[in-house]
Image: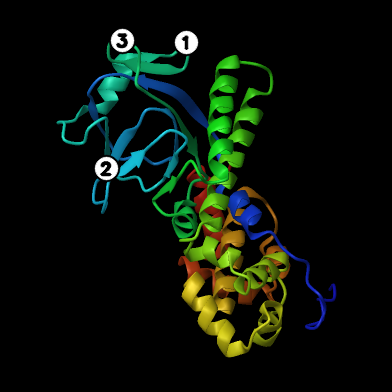
């Protein structure tokens, strides 16, 4: 058996955001340009994908069912939505909304990848994109991103997001060789920009806020850099440059769980992905994730998911969770 790193050995520095994106597996989707004129209001149903909107000209209002406030998108703004709740989008929220699905179907020009309604020159132009994520990873997205993320034009990420969505729309219409690979890559880059914008914002909280924190960020990078290591609180406290008690309080406040519990949860996410997407023996997976034995890993996995690793793999394969 290979020797494990000594407790005092330096661990590689990880990239937690890239790790999370690898699990989400952003997939290619669709993108279209929307142009509208006059007064209008549309009601759109619940959805299961990741939605991007980049405001090019004019403005539009969005009110999500159950939301506290309406969102006004102005030129240069971007909006990322994944909450799945029905919503109304309108030039004026005081108007009675019509069925948005039927409205889009009637106004769609599939040849150009655009939708246009209203008479005369449009006074509202936006680019909208929708991207799929891996089955079973919605909870992970919920943990790192608010249901609706409004990225204002002043944000450093906004220009890049608008350009990416425009490029995505153009590429999706081109039909050139390698189109799916390019559009999938653009979708991932767009999400990275959105996540960076939220993490760097003054009101950043949750996991992305913790990643940007000067104390907790290094701890997260250490955990992701070597998830198989038998980390101790003193080691993690040294990584963050604070005492053990300060680490425990600050990590729990920002991330929502204790450091070693977070490590356990991350190992289980990696295990679920490996089981449904590969054929690695359970014993090998157990060692790779830092467990002393296959039985110890199986017990931890069953406690987390309610299923033994073999059962989870069989059910995942039967449900078509493998790519």
Question: What residue is shown at x 65% (from left), y 29% (from top)?
Answer: 182
When asked about the image quadrant of residue 8, the answer is bottom right
- The residue at which mark 2 appears reads as 63
In percent of width and height, residue 40 lies at 23, 25
Q: Is mark 3 on a helix, strand or loop?
A: loop
Q: Residue furthest right?
A: 2
- Residue 238 higher or lower than 123, as above or below: below
Nearest the eye: 31 or 33: 33
* Left or right of 220 in this view: 121: left
Of marks 2 and 3, the one in the foreground: 3
- Name the quarter where the C terminus is drawn: top right
Please give the name of the residue rendered at 53% of the width and 33% of the height, measured from the top-left corner: 162
The tag earlier along the polypeptide, 3 or 1, is 1
Which residue is under mark 3? 120
Q: Position of residue 270 (x, y in %)?
A: 61, 60
Q: Distance between the residues labelled 2 and 3?
A: 26 Å
Q: Earlier in the sequence, mark 2 or mark 1?
A: 2
Could you tell me if the residues under marks 2 and 3 are in contact, i.e. CB atoms within 8 Å? no
Residue at disc 1, secondary structure = loop
Q: How many marks?
A: 3
Comes first in the chain, label 2 or label 3: 2
Q: Are marks 3 and 1 in contact (CB under 8 Å)?
A: no
Residue at image coords 61%, 34%: 186
C-beta proximity under 8 Å, tags 2 and 1: no
Query: As rendered, which of 38 and 115 lies closer to the eye?
Result: 38
Residue sitting at 37 percent across and 48 percent down?
Answer: 83
Q: Mark 1 points at which residue?
A: 111
- Between marks 3 and 1, how big is the CA–CA gap? 21 Å
76 is higher (above) or lower (below) than 227:
above
Q: In this view, does 90 lie to the left or right of 182?
A: left
């Amino acid at each position: 058996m290979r020797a494990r790193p000594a407790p005092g050995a330096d661990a590689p520095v990880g990239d937690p955001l890239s790790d999370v994106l690898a699990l989400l597996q952003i997939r290619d989707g669709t993108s279209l340009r929307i142009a509208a004129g006059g007064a209008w209001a549309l009601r759109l149903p619940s959805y299961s994908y990741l939605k991007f909107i980049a405001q090019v000209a004019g403005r539009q209002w969005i009110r999500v069912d159950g939301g506290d406030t309406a969102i006004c998108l102005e030129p240069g703004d971007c909006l990322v939505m994944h909450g799945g709740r029905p919503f109304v989008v309108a030039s004026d929220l005081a108007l009675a909304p019509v069925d948005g699905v039927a409205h889009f179907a009637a106004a769609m020009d599939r040849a150009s990848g655009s939708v246009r309604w209203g008479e005369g020159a449009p006074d509202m132009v936006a680019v909208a994109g929708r991207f799929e994520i891996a089955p079973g990873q919605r909870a992970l997205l919920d943990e790192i991103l608010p249901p609706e993320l409004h990225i204002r034009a002043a944000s450093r990420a906004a220009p890049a997001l608008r350009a990416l969505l425009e490029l995505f729309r153009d590429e999706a219409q081109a039909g050139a060789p390698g189109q799916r690979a390019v559009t999938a890559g653009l979708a991932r880059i767009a999400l990275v920009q959105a996540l960076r914008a939220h993490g760097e914002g003054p009101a950043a909280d949750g996991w992305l806020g913790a990643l940007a924190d000067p104390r907790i960020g290094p701890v997260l990078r250490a955990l992701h850099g070597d998830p198989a290591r038998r980390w101790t609180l003193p080691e993690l406290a040294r990584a963050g440059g604070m005492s053990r008690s300060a680490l425990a309080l600050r990590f729990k406040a920002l991330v929502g769980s204790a450091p070693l519990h977070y490590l356990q949860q991350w190992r289980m996410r990696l295990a679920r992905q490996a089981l449904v997407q590969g054929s690695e023996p359970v014993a090998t997976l157990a060692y790779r994730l830092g467990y002393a034995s296959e039985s110890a890993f199986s017990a931890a996995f069953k406690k987390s998911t309610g299923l033994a690793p073999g059962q989870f793999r069989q059910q995942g394969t039967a449900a078509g969770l493998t790519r």
